[in-house]
């Protein structure tokens, strides 16, 4: 008795593709792009990437729809073809479930590092030393910090070991942010859920920053944080008082009709300088109620209108919403403005700052602070034309020392 001939299936028909998708068939899986030796491996940008899961779901839906719309009913297919189709569908579904399970178990990695954030849970009650509690409070305030930040800003012995112990206890989370260094990379730390809970239970209300689990701070953000920490640290070390920028959002909007703290400080400083110069002109007999000559801090002559001082016009050069680092030296009655520069700044960033601070920079020393020397050199020519100086992070301590010695030798 002759066997019935199998029903021919087109080469690129969905049923043929599904037949090739069974494990061990020797063909690549058309739905996922995986090899038979490795089983069902999702294609795309990664096994757990959301785009990959969506692709698998869409392809499975298309293939199932193709079967239902086919001219032959599923049960009327030859037994071998029906078995192959069923195996193909089961293989795709299995691969999809495995990928979803892996994605739900693992924290998503940051786009910059593709490194898992380290999350450990405490195994029991935790008793901390004073130094370790200081670190937790520091991270509560700063949100995140690297090992070098903690070592340079806090006077704590064995800071690296303390951080490691806190992480082992489950109170801190971390990841290696320097991708090019691999396992030699420095770690960035932030409070874990258990760490935030630990402080809250001890009367220090702490918010858990869950966003860092799925999107840890990038290396660029960490470098800018280094600028934010080093500028006030170096200034205070030399006796300067520092007014740091404030951050506003929808919950705490910027006041519209009142000057910022930095603007008030600069106005008071300029007012005292103006009064001092007018008194010096009066004592020397050069003062006229309408016009007098006075020397500015750049040793060049400028004309000052006595009536302008009464009208407070000399304060118009101060931006009312100034919100950069202002360092003030009380004994010399002098100030410096530091504008911290992210690595991705454009010309628009400096156009706005030059418009705000260009005229003020003639009276108060103003610097753009860059993380590297190359970045400072790139903007040197443009900023020097406006009276704004540039300084890299490595040169900042020397520049601050020079200005401190210069101003300390002047009588207020």
Image: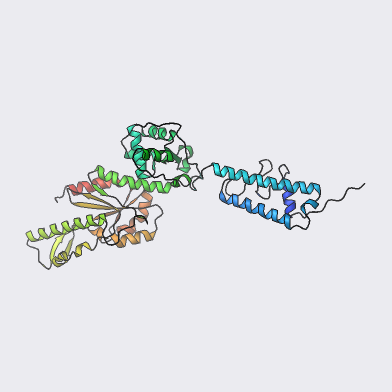
Q: Nearer the viewer, residue 199 or 107?
A: 199
- Total marks placed: 0
The residue located at (39%, 58%) in the rendering is 346
The residue located at (70%, 56%) in the rendering is 65
- Tell me if residue 186 can be seen: no
Q: Nearer the viewer, residue 362 or 339?
A: 339
Q: Position of residue 251 (x, y in %)?
A: 36, 55
Coloring applied to the structure: rainbow
Q: Position of residue 68 (x, y in %)?
A: 73, 56
Quadrant in the rendering for residue 278: bottom left
Residue 332 horizontal side relative to residue 30, left or right: left
Q: Position of residue 137 (x, y in %)?
A: 34, 40
The residue located at (20%, 46%) in the rendering is 405
Residue 265 horizontal side relative to residue 350, left or right: left
The residue located at (15%, 66%) in the rendering is 305
Q: Nearer the viewer, residue 248 or 69?
A: 69
Instruction: In the rendered view, tell whether residue 130 sits above or below residue 57.
Output: above
Quadrant in the rendering for residue 288: bottom left
- Tell me if residue 62 can be seen: yes
Q: Nearer the viewer, residue 10 or 191?
A: 191
Q: Position of residue 220 (x, y in %)?
A: 42, 48
């Amino acid at each position: 008795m002759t066997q019935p001939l199998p029903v021919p299936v087109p080469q690129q028909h969905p049923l043929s593709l599904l037949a090739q998708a069974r494990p061990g068939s020797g063909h690549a899986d058309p739905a996922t792009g995986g090899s038979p030796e490795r089983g069902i491996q999702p294609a795309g940008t990664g096994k757990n990437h959301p785009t990959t899961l969506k692709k698998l779901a869409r392809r499975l839906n298309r293939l199932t729809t193709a079967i239902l719309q086919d001219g032959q009913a599923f049960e009327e297919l030859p037994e071998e073809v029906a078995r192959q189709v069923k195996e193909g569908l089961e293989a795709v579904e299995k691969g999809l479930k495995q990928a979803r399970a892996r994605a739900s178990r693992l924290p998503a990695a940051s786009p910059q590092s593709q490194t898992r954030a380290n999350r450990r849970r405490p195994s029991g009650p935790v008793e901390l030393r004073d130094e370790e509690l200081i670190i937790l409070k520091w991270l509560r305030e700063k949100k995140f910090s690297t090992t070098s930040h903690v070592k340079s800003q806090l006077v704590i012995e064995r800071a690296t070991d303390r951080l490691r112990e806190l992480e082992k206890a489950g109170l801190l989370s971390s990841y290696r942010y320097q991708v090019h260094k691999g396992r030699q990379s420095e770690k960035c730390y932030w409070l874990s859920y258990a760490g935030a809970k630990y402080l809250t239970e001890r009367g220090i209300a702490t918010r858990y920053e869950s966003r860092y689990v799925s999107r840890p701070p990038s290396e660029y953000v960490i470098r800018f944080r280094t600028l934010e920490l080093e500028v006030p640290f170096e200034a205070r070390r030399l006796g300067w008082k520092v007014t740091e920028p404030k951050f506003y959002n929808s919950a705490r909007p910027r006041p519209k009709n009142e000057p910022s703290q930095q603007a008030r400080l600069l106005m008071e400083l300029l007012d005292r300088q103006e009064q001092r110069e007018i008194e010096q002109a009066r004592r020397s007999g050069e003062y006229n109620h309408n016009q007098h000559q006075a020397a500015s801090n750049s040793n060049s002559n400028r004309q000052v209108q006595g009536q302008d001082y009464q009208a407070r016009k000399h304060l118009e050069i101060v931006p009312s919403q100034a919100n950069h680092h202002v360092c003030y030296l009380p004994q010399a009655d002098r100030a410096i403005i530091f504008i911290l520069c992210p690595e991705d700044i454009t010309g628009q960033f400096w156009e706005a700052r030059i418009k705000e601070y260009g005229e003020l920079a003639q009276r108060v020393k103003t610097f753009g602070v860059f993380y590297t020397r190359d970045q400072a050199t790139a903007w040197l020519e443009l900023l020097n034309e406006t009276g704004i100086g540039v300084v890299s992070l490595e040169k900042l301590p020397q520049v601050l020392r020079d200005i401190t010695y210069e101003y300390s030798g002047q009588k207020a």
